[in-house]
Image (cartoon, rainbow, N blue to C red):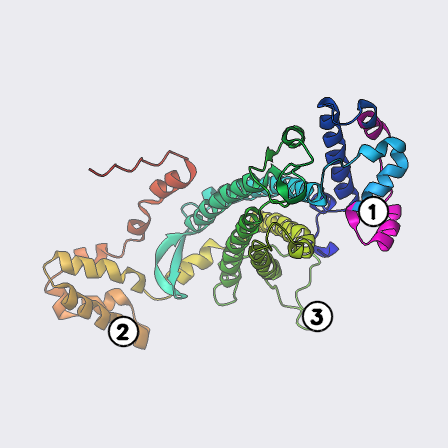
Amino acid sequence: MIPRYSRPEMARLWEPEAKFRIWLKIETLAAEAMAELGLIPKRAAEAVRKRGGFDIARIDAIEGQVRHDVIAFLTSVAEKVGPEARFLHQGMTSSDVLDTCFNLQLVQAADLLIADMDALLQALKARAFEHKNTPTVGRSHGMHAEPTTFGLKLAYAYAEFDRARARLVTAREEVATCAISGAVGTFAHVDPRVEAYVAEKLDLRPEPISTQVIPRDRHAAYFAALAVVASSIERLATEIRHLQRTELLEAEEHFAEGQKGSSAMPHKRNPVLSENLTGLARLVRAYALPALEDVALWHERDISHSSVERVIGPDATIALDFALVRMTELIKGLQVYPKRMRANLDALRGLIHSQRVLLALIEAGVSREEAYRLVQRNAMKVWEKNSDFLDELLTDEEVMRVLSEETLRTQFDLAYHLKHVDTIFARVFDKRPSPRPRKGR
């Protein structure tokens, strides 16, 4: 990922230095296990532990000749360890190092992403409670529907990202495996206890069965989870972009002092952060497809997945890390305009209460079809004449024969629509366990 969208802590996980350190740790732990089992001399494991190291420039030079990164690495390490290095990598294959390392990097990346998610959830919760009772219009098809609150919009986002966090935890669990099983995964030349030892020291689980490579359905699930999280980011970013449109202007990204919105139009305050998040979400989603295609390798293994993962591992995790942090800062600094929300609520001059009038007519004995006709007839007059919905209803003789003026006016109470906000907030934020489903007879 380019530096513009890279945060240092996540980017460091994918630097060559970090990768080779993990490779060396895997080889060192494997040598220790083999020495304990009497498979190699203890002095060899001690030499690897004490003198093991690598030189990235030297690895690159060797790889330029041998065209094999793991062999180049092992050669560089051997040059530092000395004669005992002949016992290094005993019975192992390159994928034992590569796959275990990749999985460990993905686990470490997931830990950072989960921490990012926790910060976003905290920001969403704070702003949701701040605007718990701030009325605004809900929209369907982009059109005014019925009243809601801005807090409920943010509570919806909180619930979605709470599920996203759970997906990240599951994704982390999915890839937290280690394979030290040798060529085609049969353990013919390496004891399974070596794998168990390395896995325990790296806080991973032994892969139940590998075919020289760890099964790529695990990685597909991981990157698919990242893609879903990215889509949730885009959903919230799209909401903010719409709310910032000049015609609505109910909420707006923070515009810092000295910031400029356009090279040509000094008046512009554009939703650039939300637009950027939309673009980053597209990238992260795009990485899910090659991960899915990596599942189908030839026979026990091939390396068609290798080039893919060298790109999508760093890029997807770095991009999502950046996006989550950017979204958190956006939510913290979001400018909210309750007066504008109220003005937009009133813009259709009472039409947002049409369903209440419909139901009142039905409760008074009018058929649903007839009640719908009466309400829609008056609603269309408001659209055409820019008149007031209540006034139109009060002058409609058919409506007034059924409803009293007092009953009719009662249907235009904004508070009626918001009476269950506390209930919804309790469901979202109280974390009460869901009732267990009843067993069928």
* Vertical side of 353 occupied by 60: above or below: above
In the image, which residues are magenta? 45-70
Residue reaching furthest to the bottom: 384
Q: Residues within 10 Å of mark 1 (few under 14, many from 20)?
A: many
Identify the image quadrant of residue 25: top right
Residue with the mark numbered 3: 263
Q: Quadrant of the C terminus?
A: top left
Of circles 1 and 3, which is in front?
1
* Disc 3 residue type (three-letter): Ser
> Residue 48: where, in percent of width, then height?
82, 30
Front residue of 335 and 327:
327
Residue 72, labelled with which disc? 1
Q: Is 264 positioned to the left or the right of 141 in the image?
A: right
Q: Residue at x 66, y 28 (%)?
A: 197
Front residue of 434 and 440:
440
Secondary structure under the numbered disc 3 in the rendered image: loop
Q: Say if mark 2 contacts mark 1, CB within 8 Å.
A: no
Residue 380, labelled with which disc? 2
> Residue 121: where, in percent of width, then height?
52, 42
